């Protein structure tokens, strides 16, 4: 069982923001708070006290992110290599047994996220716990889809991910498929259907803000 403060949480804010017109997504406002800061605040409020350290993965405007009060680490891989580059950076700087990854553009992720993912590690064979939820916040959809940027990982997976990325691997699922990955559904009664809706455009962000 994962104990208090054994998880380092990483906010992924290192993307190009292409679908937002190239803006730095993590610095866009959600209810008057930059998205990356909003994510940090929600991580601090996680139930169970499981979160110890907090970090941000960003590749632009580093001083702006550093102003949020937590370490900021750019990708070690070149050319905006995607979320897996953020995973690699997070694992390289993680000093706790586990790393939790969350994207900056999903501002309503649950406050019991860490606790529910951590429960998957009651089985000592678990390497990774990954969220599944209904696509786009559609609570009428019957199928759950994995949300691979919401992962809780064993920190000792760093050598595996290093080897995978050095071989040119960039797809999260192709790497997680190499390990014992438990998919954790977020479909309980009372779960917010918008919890894992990610805002890819400014219009989607504004729509979510008004929800």
Image (spheres, helix red, strand yellow):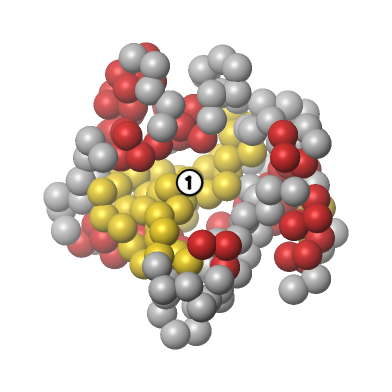
> Residue at left 62%, top 55%?
198
Q: Disc 1 marks which residue?
A: 149
**Image quadrant for the C terminus?**
bottom right
Q: Nearer the viewer, residue 55 or 201?
A: 201
Q: Nearer the viewer, residue 153 or 17?
A: 17
Return the x and y of residue 168 as percentages of the image width and height: 39, 16
> Residue at left 59%, top 28%?
73
Does residue 24 appear to the left or right of 32 in the view shown? left
- Mark 1 lies on a secondary structure that is strand
Return the x and y of residue 203 as percentages of the image width and height: 80, 55
Residue 33 seen anywhere in this rendered image of the structure: no
Q: Nearer the viewer, residue 29 or 134?
A: 134
Return the x and y of residue 117 as percentages of the image width and height: 36, 60
Residue 209 seen anywhere in this rendered image of the structure: yes
Quadrant in the picture for residue 138: bottom right
> Residue at left 51%, top 62%?
135
**Image quadrant for the N terminus?**
bottom left
């Amino acid at each position: 069982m994962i104990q208090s403060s054994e998880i380092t949480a990483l906010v992924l804010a290192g993307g190009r923001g292409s679908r937002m017109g190239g803006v730095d997504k993590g610095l866009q406002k959600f209810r008057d708070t930059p998205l990356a800061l909003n994510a940090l605040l929600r991580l601090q409020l996680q139930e169970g006290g499981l979160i110890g350290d907090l970090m941000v993965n960003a590749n632009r405007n580093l001083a702006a992110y550093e102003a949020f009060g937590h370490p900021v680490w750019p990708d070690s891989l070149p050319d905006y290599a995607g979320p897996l580059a953020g995973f690699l950076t997070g694992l390289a700087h993680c000093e706790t047994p586990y790393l939790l990854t969350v994207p900056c553009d999903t501002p309503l992720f649950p406050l019991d996220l860490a606790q529910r993912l951590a429960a998957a590690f009651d089985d000592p064979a678990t390497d990774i716990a990954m969220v599944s939820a209904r696509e786009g916040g559609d609570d009428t959809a019957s199928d759950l889809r994995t949300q691979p940027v919401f992962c809780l990982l064993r920190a000792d997976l760093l050598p595996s991910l290093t080897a995978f990325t050095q071989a040119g691997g960039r797809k999260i699922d192709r790497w997680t498929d190499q390990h014992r990955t438990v998919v954790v559904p977020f479909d309980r009664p009372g779960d917010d259907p918008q919890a894992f809706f990610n805002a890819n455009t400014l219009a989607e962000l504004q729509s979510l803000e008004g929800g």
